[in-house]
Amino acid sequence: MEFDFQTLSGKDRYKLLVATVVPRPIAWVVTQSASGVVNAAPYSFFNAIAGSPPLLAISIDGRDGERKDTAVNIRHSGQFVVNLVNDAMSHDMVVTAIDFDPTVSETTEAKLATTPSIKIAPPRITASPVAFECEIFQTVELPGNRDLVLGHVVMMHVVDEAVMDAARCYIDTPKLDLVGRMHSGGWYSRTRDQFEIPRIDVADWKTSAG
Ligand SMILES: Cc1cc2nc3c(=O)[nH]c(=O)nc-3n(C[C@H](O)[C@H](O)[C@H](O)COP(=O)(O)O)c2cc1C
């Protein structure tokens, strides 16, 4: 079966993308409004896209043709924290996706403790196992008041228990117990089912092909 993305509606294209590009990591983004309201919301059109410069990408859709609070705040301050979501926090994360008025703080509604960031104004979510303090690198404006935001990571926090060797930057990834977003309807996946396939160099490949 083929689907022609040049003739499908936006809604159908979205349905096909989110039903197949899975699991998607979740950026739990904390921003601050011009009047100081701390905003939190999850975004799963998200990934790490480069190590040098260290860039994260988040795609923020429009809502009724207007920019979402996260996009408004990032445009205003140029700063945001990307927190990652573990299994224990997944229900709190969903609370912050409620379409609250911009004057309402999702961290207050979800009773989420926050900790001041080191280099930027928006705080991080204290219990998140990983948080990236970001400054805006570039915003690509998409049609319909959508923003593809590229964030430059200026500071990273990792929960102590998951740091195996700080000098070597070795992280115990399974210990983070992160979750990803699956298809629509509120489905998620855990990251506990893992397997290893070592890389093969050319010499070994030639030997084994023998
Ligand atoms: C797991 C999850 C992932 C989401 N991913 C996105 C996304 O990638 N882009 C987007 O525009 N909205 C996404 N949403 C919806 C926003 O979180 C929701 O519209 C939220 O109210 C936006 O809040 P804000 O106006 O405070 O920024 C997602 C929701 C959930 C629960």
Image: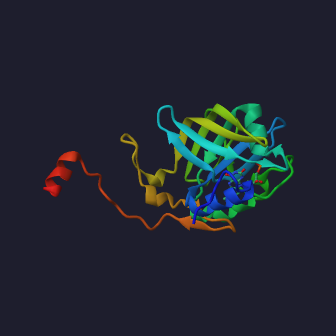
- Residue 137 position (above or below residue 87): above
- Residue 76 position (above or below residue 91): above
**Residue 137 pos. (x, y %):** 62, 31
Of the pair 125 and 99, the residue shown nearer to us: 99
- Residue 12 position (above or below residue 122): below
Of the pair 96 and 72, the residue shown nearer to us: 72
Q: What residue do we see at 62% from left, 32% from top?
A: 119
Position of 196 compared to 129: left or right?
left
Q: What residue do we see at 79% from left, 57% from top?
A: 109
Q: What residue do we see at 64% from left, 31% from top?
A: 138
**Residue 74 pos. (x, y %):** 73, 37
- Residue 195 position (above or below residue 35): below
**Which of the 4 quarters of the picture holds residue 81?**
top right
Q: What residue do we see at 63% from left, 56% from top?
A: 4
Position of 153 compared to 79: left or right?
left
Which image quarter is the N terminus in? bottom right
**Residue 51 pos. (x, y %):** 47, 37
Which image quarter is the C terminus in? bottom left
Does the rendering let one see residue 111? Answer: no
Position of 90 compared to 54: left or right?
right
